[in-house]
Image (tube, grey):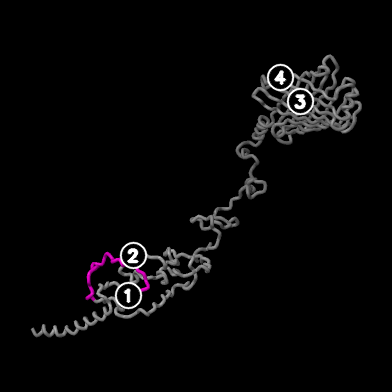
Amino acid sequence: MSRALFAAVAVLPLMLAAGSAVAQSHGGHGAQPTRVADPHAGHDMSGMQMAPAQTPAVDPHAGHNISPTPAAADPHAGHDMSAMRTAPAQTPAADPHAGHNISPTPAAADPHAGHDMSAMRTAPAQTPASDPHAGHKMSAVPAAAADPHAGHDMSGMQAAPAQAPAADPHAGHNMGQATAADSHAGHDMSGMAGGAPNIPTSVDAVGGRMVETPPPAAARAAPAHAADLLFDPAVMAASRKQLLAENGDIRSTAVLIDAIESSFGDGEKGYSWNAQGWTGGDINRFWWKTQGEGVFDGKLHEAEVQALYSRAVAPFWDVQAGVRQDFRPDGEDTTHLTVGVQGVAPYWFEMGAAAFLSTEGDLTARVEAEYDQRITQKWILQPAIELALSASDIPELEIGSGLTSVTAGLRLRYEIRKEFAPYVGVEWNRSLGDTADYAKARGEDPEDVRLVVGIRAWF
């Protein structure tokens, strides 16, 4: 019993001191219940409009009268702090932009940073137990420490250029079209040697041909024909000669009757012919040509025959040289030296041109062109034109200098067989210059249009 009384006596002063502290901490306060989590009890907050405080749902003592309970967590309880100004918040030392005007730059983490929200009533804040400033007007308080620029006026500040990471060797290059996987996109790498081997192509050579290296020296040390190493060279030479004769030096002969026809016009009915042929190989040939005209029940006007040596100088083109002999009923026969070309031009125009130098020293020329336009496999339309020229006047032949005549024709033939085709057509002839004057002196019209009927054949 004595020990219990002694303990009670010892504890009594402590209880009296605690009661005095409780009475002092609530001095001047009403009888309203005190919230344990309010660290600002006793502050002068008369100028602040606050929404009705919402009691956190986790407070098991909401509505209870706990005035006798001391607020142990409030170090300022009972102090008069109405005249005290809160010191401005200290900017964290790690903020290099403190005090800068960067209001237009929104903080990525705070969508409302820099907004003036002083006149805005906030909804009743659900203040977590760990937020000591719940419900306070904090328009002048900087944003949370996670946003170093929140609340700063940065309208006049130009943002510094972004610093490229040191590990990026291409920082600052224009890589707008680059994909994430291409670290060199946008760079001019035309002069950079790639990893592939440098193989010559046609691009490396003038003219677009592949670059060819000379054959090794050993390739020229052997015989020209490898078969001579296995067989008798004399036997192989005879075989090659026979092969050339059978495949590359074939002798052929052809005759082309280009036209045997009758003509009908205002004057007399006439006839004419034009034929040619050759014999020989693909390179060297002997050519002959003949043409002439006359009238039925009358005299032969003129005829000519040519004997020519022909040499192939290009695909489809031959150079020809030889003699030409003219026959006339009045005995004015003439011999000419002939040089010309004959072949097929692009788009299958058959062309021929020749110059003739007579034994009298007269120089004349003739140019011909014709084209076969296939309408069907059987019907073919053939336009043709011929120009005659003379370097000087030839009175005995009634030919003037310059362009002496133009002849144009259009013939439509039907190929009964490839080797035989009848045709009908129209032909126009016009004498020019002094040649026309000679025709008028003879009482002839220098211009003539005639209907022609004939056949074309070859064998």
Q: Which image quadrant: the N terminus? A: bottom left
Q: Of tags 3 and 4, which is closer to the observer? A: 3
Q: Of tags 4 and 2, which is closer to the observer? A: 2
Q: Which amino acid does the dot numbered 2 rest on?
A: Pro
For residue 397, above or below residue 210: above
In the image: residue 332, left or right of residue 347: right
For residue 39, above or below residue 340: below
Q: Residue at x 39, y 78 (%)?
A: 85
Relative image position of residue 225 (x, y in whole percent): 64, 39
- Which residue position is annotated with label 4? 422
Camera-nearest residue between 258 and 247: 258
In the image: residue 10, left or right of residue 180: left
Q: Which mark is residue 40?
A: 1
- Which residue position is annotated with label 2? 124
Q: Which image quadrant: the C terminus? A: top right
Distance from the alpha carbon under mark 3 to that under mark 2: 108 Å
